[in-house]
Image (spheres, rainbow, N blue to C red):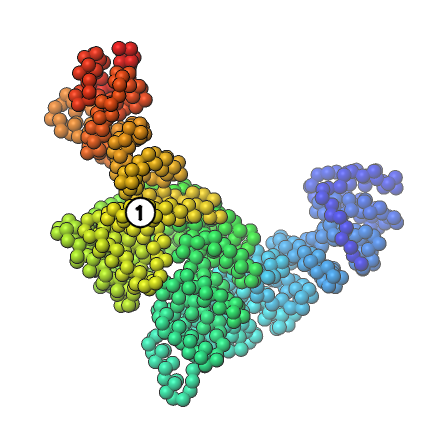
């Protein structure tokens, strides 16, 4: 038997040659170069080793010579040498010669290099016969090695026809497995990986090449093997998303009357859905009943039905079965339930499910998938988990589409940890994991800004699952970088893949435009648009969304952005969706163009475009803002919001997702609580809960956006105990996000979690006489990277200045964060007020810079005039309480120079004993007030 000996890890060292070896031969063999052997050298070796022959050639010398001949490209000589010394009897069973796999591989590659396929087939047949039972892994590795060698050799060896590669693979797989029909890459990766890589290299070949291969295989190995191989090719090309070739291979099987398998049918249905040929999906599925596989094919049928069926007519037809004496069978239930699920008719789906159970019918995959989809479509995300477990209860295997749906559930719940556990479960269940699954998981990372997990998922997809990236997954990773404030990394990914011929290639160009918008780079946006035109990439919906965003956000050209939207409404093939209007509404919201938002909403209604929660949010916000500005009475906007919520719940509003996001009611709650009637605010929340969650379910109150509104509500009615309770739960909720296993990087989107809330927290601490807890809270939030807004800082320092125990903390905040912005604002006001005095304005670099860039020197943090007035008043009171005013004043000036400079610009006459300070430090104070600088405080200290 042939046994595997230890492979040689490096070239053989020079040997101590036998004395019988002539010096000429030793000289040739000791040459360590890699250049091809010359004819005289070949002749000398052939004379000595082949014609004369060596009776007892040591194994070590033999292995050296084999390696030498292979390295020096003396392939014919190696073949002769092998026939004499490796397999002298042509029998691999006799391993008395110590034949190693390294020698065998070099011999086989030499046979390929000389086009000697007959001997190669003999060797492969013998190896498979020896190893396929007890050492199948060895046989598989050897066959994979030879297939790769043959693939590479066919490119350079003229005598090997290109079609020979697939012919040999089919022949060897039949010898190894008894067939060559494979339909599960994950399960059969060791066999299919070399073939998959070969097909990727051949992705640009004309379909005639594969037809010639199959014709040759049919002639040499029979129609059965040709049919099996074509099924494997169809599966792998669908896996590679080479759908044009899938269709051509399917046509070949049909035209040649080859057997259609369930895998073939599944792949062609997937292909037709890709090309949006939905009528062919239904017709083709019906034409091959023997190849039906409900687990794999129903998802594509569902897509086709959702695009082409009349739901009411289908339901009427179903109900009519009861009236004509024929009861619906389980297939009827499945079709109607899937139809109802597609439009979110959860009640109808659940009634049909209960009905079939009462009839003692066992649910099928179609039924359970419809039930799951109906709950998802209705927004019952938490109940989707119970529906998913029904697959296990009834021993029905979920499909890849089932897992896609569950990944979307986790995405809607922002639960990446649960999604990763589901990925592991899918892998262990042998589900065919696709790029679409990974794109969903990667895209989830943009919600909590963790590019590390996204990168790892991308690498796992490539390396572990051997899924080649297309524009779908690459653009998802680019989006994660953009949302994580790393647009440069997104663009480096773009530059790496932009020239590759990928499916969904336009997607990475669209993300590049988004990255340039994030960077404010207008010229590169225009350059990328031009690249898209030059490359003739077909426009898609996302392309127009990027163009609208570029015009509205970067160029501020709202008129042109609306004209693009109007052109899109008339586009023959691309129809605008809610996202195009959402981009423009967001831009209008930022510039407070309320009328523009109302006009866009009207245009959506006129063109029957479904709305989503964000569009409703902008609409409601615009309505509230207009009403507050004109009349102040919020009764009408509240009625509008109630009507919208009712219509959404009753499904009379054309909406993309049946359950409105809590932010739709959360923002109006805060406005109503602050400016109108706090009790009306809580009525809005109760109404929202009743419509979308039921009276008993208050789980929505745990959402951050709702808790924010409840904090405002409880603060406005001064229910401080309730405020404290909600605030603790709010902090705990954020802590739980940051302690999750997936929180390997900080979620930058949580940075603003306390924006607007510290203002109320300060009031709470003041009301409960616990202001000394404020410094620790502020320090903790800052240390963790949370944003504290300017209004909250001002409220905080006003509170801190009132208490002598915390005034120094307030002084530090004002000195380090707020006084600089205060001075800039007042300097600009002063210069603008005295613009007519040329002596002041002509020499002001500050005004020149403001003129060049009006957005410059606009501080985000500053002490307001009202707060400045109050803190100086509290400062006067504090100084009046100090015993050694002069010495304490000098200490404060040294510790808080920026604030004290502003504070001392005017005499503090309300401070007890200030007249003495003014008299004793007259020159110092005069210099400070004239130069607006503190040159030295030593004068003040030593008075």
Would residue 756 be found to the left or right of residue 61 on screen? Answer: left
- Placement of the N terminus among the 4 image quadrants: bottom right
Task: Name the foreground residue: 527 vs 320.
Answer: 320
| Residue at 12% across, 52% down | 631
Which residue is rendered at x = 28% and y = 32% of the image?
800
Q: Which residue is mark 1?
A: 721
Q: Is residue 337 visible?
A: yes
| Residue 640 placement: quadrant | bottom left
Q: Is residue 230 left or right of residue 797?
A: right
Name above or below for residue 458 compared with residue 783.
below
Which image quadrant for residue 699? bottom left
Horizontal relation, residue 541 to residue 824: left or right: right
Residue at left offset 52%, top offset 49%:
459
Q: Position of residue 705 (x, y in %)?
A: 32, 51
Q: Secondary structure at mark 1?
A: helix
Which residue is outermost to the bottom? 325
**Relative to 448, does residue 909 appear above or below in the rendering?**
above
| Residue 921 position in % (x across, y down) | 22, 13
User: In the rendered picture of this protein, how many numbered marks are placed on residues?
Assistant: 1
Q: Position of residue 337 (x, y in %)?
A: 40, 74
Q: Residues within 10 Å of mark 1 (few under 14, many from 20)?
A: few
Residue closest to the eye, 567 or 715? 715
Within the image, what quadrant is residue 619 found in? bottom left
**At 62% across and 73% down in the image, what residue appears?**
224
Q: Which residue occupies the foreground of this view, 176 or 152? A: 176
Residue 493 visible in rendering: no
Location of the C terminus (image quadrant): top left
In the depicted view, which residue is nearer to us: 725 or 243? 725
């Amino acid at each position: 038997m042939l046994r595997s000996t230890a492979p040689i890890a490096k070239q053989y060292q020079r040997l101590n040659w036998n004395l019988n070896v002539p010096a000429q031969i030793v000289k040739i063999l000791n040459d360590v170069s890699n250049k091809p052997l010359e004819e005289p050298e070949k002749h000398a070796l052939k004379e000595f080793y082949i014609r004369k022959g060596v009776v007892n050639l040591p194994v070590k010398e033999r292995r050296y010579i084999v390696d030498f001949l292979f390295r020096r490209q003396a392939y014919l000589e190696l073949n002769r040498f092998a026939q004499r010394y490796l397999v002298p009897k042509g029998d691999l069973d006799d391993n008395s010669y110590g034949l190693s796999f390294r020698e065998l591989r070099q011999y086989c590659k030499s046979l390929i290099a000389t086009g000697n396929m007959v001997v190669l087939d003999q060797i492969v047949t013998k190896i498979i016969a020896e190893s396929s039972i007890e050492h199948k892994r060895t046989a598989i590795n050897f066959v994979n090695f030879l297939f790769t060698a043959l693939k590479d050799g066919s490119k350079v060896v003229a005598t090997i026809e290109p079609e020979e590669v697939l012919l040999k693979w089919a022949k060897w797989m039949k010898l190894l497995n008894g067939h060559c029909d494979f339909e599960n890459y994950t399960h059969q990766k060791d066999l299919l990986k070399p073939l998959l890589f070969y097909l990727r290299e051949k992705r640009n070949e004309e379909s005639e090449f594969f037809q010639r291969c199959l014709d040759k295989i049919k002639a040499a190995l029979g129609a059965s093997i040709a049919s099996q191989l074509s099924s494997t090719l169809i599966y792998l090309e669908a896996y590679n998303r080479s759908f044009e070739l899938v269709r051509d291979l399917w046509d070949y099987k049909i035209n040649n009357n080859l057997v259609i398998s369930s895998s073939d049918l599944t792949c062609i249905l997937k292909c037709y859905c890709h090309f949006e040929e939905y009528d062919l999906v239904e017709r083709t599925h019906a034409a091959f009943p023997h190849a039906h596989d409900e687990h794999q094919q129903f998802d594509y049928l569902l897509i086709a039905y959702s695009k082409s069926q009349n739901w009411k007519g289908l339901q009427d037809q179903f109900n009519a079965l009861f009236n004509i004496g024929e009861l619906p069978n389980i297939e009827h239930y499945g079709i109607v339930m899937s139809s109802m699920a597609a439009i979110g008719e959860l009640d109808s789906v659940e009634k049909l499910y209960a009905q079939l159970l009462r009839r003692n019918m066992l649910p099928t995959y179609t039924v359970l998938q419809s039930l799951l989809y109906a709950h998802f479509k209705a927004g019952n995300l938490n109940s989707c988990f119970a529906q998913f477990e029904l697959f296990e209860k009834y021993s029905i295997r979920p499909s890849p589409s089932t897992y896609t749906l569950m990944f979307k559930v986790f995405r809607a719940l922002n639960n990446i940890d649960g999604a990763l556990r589901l990925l592991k479960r899918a892998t262990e269940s042998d589900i065919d994991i696709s790029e679409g699954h990974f794109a969903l998981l990667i895209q989830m990372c943009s919600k909590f800004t963790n590019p590390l997990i996204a990168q790892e998922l991308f690498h796992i997809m490539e390396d572990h699952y051997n899924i080649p990236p297309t524009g779908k997954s690459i653009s998802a990773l680019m989006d994660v970088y953009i949302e994580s404030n790393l647009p440069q990394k997104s663009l480096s990914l773009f530059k790496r893949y932009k020239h590759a011929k990928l499916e969904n290639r336009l997607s990475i160009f669209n993300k590049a435009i988004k990255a340039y918008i994030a960077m404010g780079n207008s010229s590169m946006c225009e350059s990328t648009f031009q690249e898209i035109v030059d490359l003739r990439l077909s426009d898609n919906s996302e392309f127009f969304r990027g163009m609208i965003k570029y015009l509205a956000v970067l160029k501020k050209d709202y008129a042109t952005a609306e004209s693009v939207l109007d052109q899109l409404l008339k586009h023959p093939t691309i129809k605008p969706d809610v996202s195009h209007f959402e981009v423009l509404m967001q831009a209008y919201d930022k510039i407070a163009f309320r009328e523009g938002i109302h006009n866009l909403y009207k245009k959506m209604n006129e063109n029957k475009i479904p709305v989503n929660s964000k569009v409703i949010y902008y609409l409601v916000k615009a309505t509230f803002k207009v009403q507050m500005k004109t009349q102040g009475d919020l009764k009408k906007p509240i009625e509008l919001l109630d009507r919208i919520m009712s219509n959404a719940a009753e499904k009379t509003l054309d909406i993309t997702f049946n359950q409105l996001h809590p932010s739709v009611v959360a923002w109006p709650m805060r406005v109503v609580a602050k400016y109108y009637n706090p009790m009306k605010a809580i009525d809005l929340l109760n109404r929202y809960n009743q419509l979308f969650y039921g009276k008993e379910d208050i789980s929505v109150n745990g959402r951050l956006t709702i808790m924010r509104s409840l904090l405002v509500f409880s603060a406005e009615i001064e229910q401080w105990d309730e405020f404290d309770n909600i605030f603790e739960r709010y902090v705990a909720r954020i802590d739980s996000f940051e302690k999750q296993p997936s929180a390997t990087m900080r979620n930058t989107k949580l940075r603003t979690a306390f924006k607007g809330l510290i203002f109320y927290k300060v009031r709470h601490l003041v009301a409960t006489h616990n202001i000394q807890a404020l410094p620790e809270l502020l320090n903790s939030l800052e240390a963790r990277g949370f944003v504290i807004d300017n209004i909250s800082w001002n409220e905080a320092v006003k509170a801190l200045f009132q208490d002598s125990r915390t005034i120094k903390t307030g002084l530090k905040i004002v000195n380090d964060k707020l006084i600089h912005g205060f001075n800039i604002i007042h300097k600009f006001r002063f210069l603008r007020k005295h613009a007519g005095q040329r002596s002041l304005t002509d020499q002001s670099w500050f005004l020149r810079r403001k003129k060049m860039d009006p957005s410059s020197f606009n501080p985000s943090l500053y002490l307001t005039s009202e707060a400045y007035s109050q803190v100086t008043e509290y400062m006067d009171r504090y100084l009046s309480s100090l015993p050694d005013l002069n010495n304490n004043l000098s200490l404060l000036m040294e510790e808080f120079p920026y604030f004290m400079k502003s504070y001392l610009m005017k005499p503090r006459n309300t401070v007890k004993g200030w007249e003495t300070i003014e008299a004793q430090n007259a020159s110092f104070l005069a210099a400070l007030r004239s130069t607006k600088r503190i040159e030295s405080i030593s004068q003040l200290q030593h008075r």
